[in-house]
């Protein structure tokens, strides 16, 4: 009986302390975090990053748009959320009418030094991942740069094995 009373008190406390609000905010949400394991800051852009605009960057066209899309800067050893919504990623793929979404990785320093136009025309992309829905699920919605062994079968350019674990090209 003592355990039942304790459980009842805990449930009552959680109810009055806003447990439902936490559940509303975290259940049914899809979050994609991008991890930077390189020894330098990177910038990521994708159709997944708000504002959601399929005309900006959509596979199979992997050219970069004339106007700079929104990018997310990620410091060394850190991660940033690039997608956070109350919808499943399958809904996003369906909305864009595609089975693949590209993620582009750039050097933040290069982007700030030469600017978008130069980066775009020289296609100075460190890495491009062309990720299908199943790839995201296998990665637990957590892609990284440089790509990990777990990512070796994901379609990417340049190919897996181009960079060492710190993000430097392998000679």
Image (tube, rainbow, N blue to C red):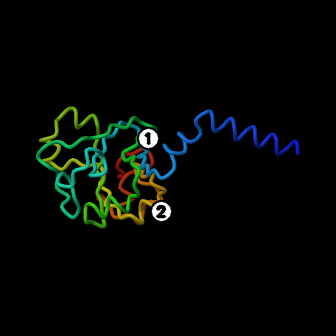
The count of marks equals 2
Residue 95 at x, y percent in the picture: 27, 61
Compared with 113, 127 (above or below) is below
Which disc, if any, is residue 125? none
Dividing the image into 4 quarters, which one contains the N terminus? top right
Residue 121 at x, y percent in the picture: 12, 48
Instruction: Provide the residue designation for mark 1.
Output: 79
Instruction: Provide the residue designation for mark 2.
Output: 138
Between 80 and 152, the one nearer to me in the picture: 80
Residue 117 at x, y percent in the picture: 12, 41
- Describe residue 59's horizontal placement relative to residue 6 as left or right: left
Q: Secondary structure at mark 1?
A: strand
Q: Secondary structure at mark 2?
A: helix
Q: Residues within 10 Å of mark 2 (few under 14, many from 20)?
A: few
Residue 25 at x, y percent in the picture: 48, 43
Q: Residue at x 31, y 51 (%)?
A: 48
- Describe residue 47's horizontal placement relative to residue 6 as left or right: left
Q: Are marks 2 and 1 in contact (CB under 8 Å)?
A: no
- Describe residue 115's horizontal placement relative to residue 161 as left or right: left
Specify the quadrant of the image occupied by residue 37: top left
Give the mark nearest the N terminus, 2 or 1. 1
Between 153 and 167, the one nearer to me in the picture: 153
Between 15 and 82, the one nearer to me in the picture: 15
Between 115 and 67, the one nearer to me in the picture: 67
Q: CA distance from mark 2 to mark 1?
A: 18 Å
Q: Residue furthest right?
A: 1
């Amino acid at each position: 009986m003592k355990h039942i009373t304790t459980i009842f008190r805990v449930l009552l406390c959680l109810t009055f302390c806003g447990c439902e609000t936490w559940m509303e905010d975290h259940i049914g949400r899809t979050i994609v975090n991008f991890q930077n394991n390189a020894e330098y800051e990177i910038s990521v852009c994708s159709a997944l990053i708000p504002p959601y605009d399929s005309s900006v960057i959509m596979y199979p066209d992997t050219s970069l748009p004339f106007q700079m899309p929104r990018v997310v800067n990620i410091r060394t050893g850190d991660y940033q959320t690039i997608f956070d919504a109350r919808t499943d990623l399958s809904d996003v793929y369906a909305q864009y009418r595609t089975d693949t979404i590209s993620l582009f990785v750039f050097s933040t320093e290069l982007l700030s030094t030469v600017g978008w136009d130069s980066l775009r025309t020289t296609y100075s992309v460190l890495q491009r991942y062309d990720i299908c829905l199943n790839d995201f699920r296998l990665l637990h919605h957590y892609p990284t740069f440089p790509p990990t062994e777990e990512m070796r079968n994901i379609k990417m350019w340049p190919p897996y094995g181009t960079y060492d674990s710190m993000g430097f090209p392998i000679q």
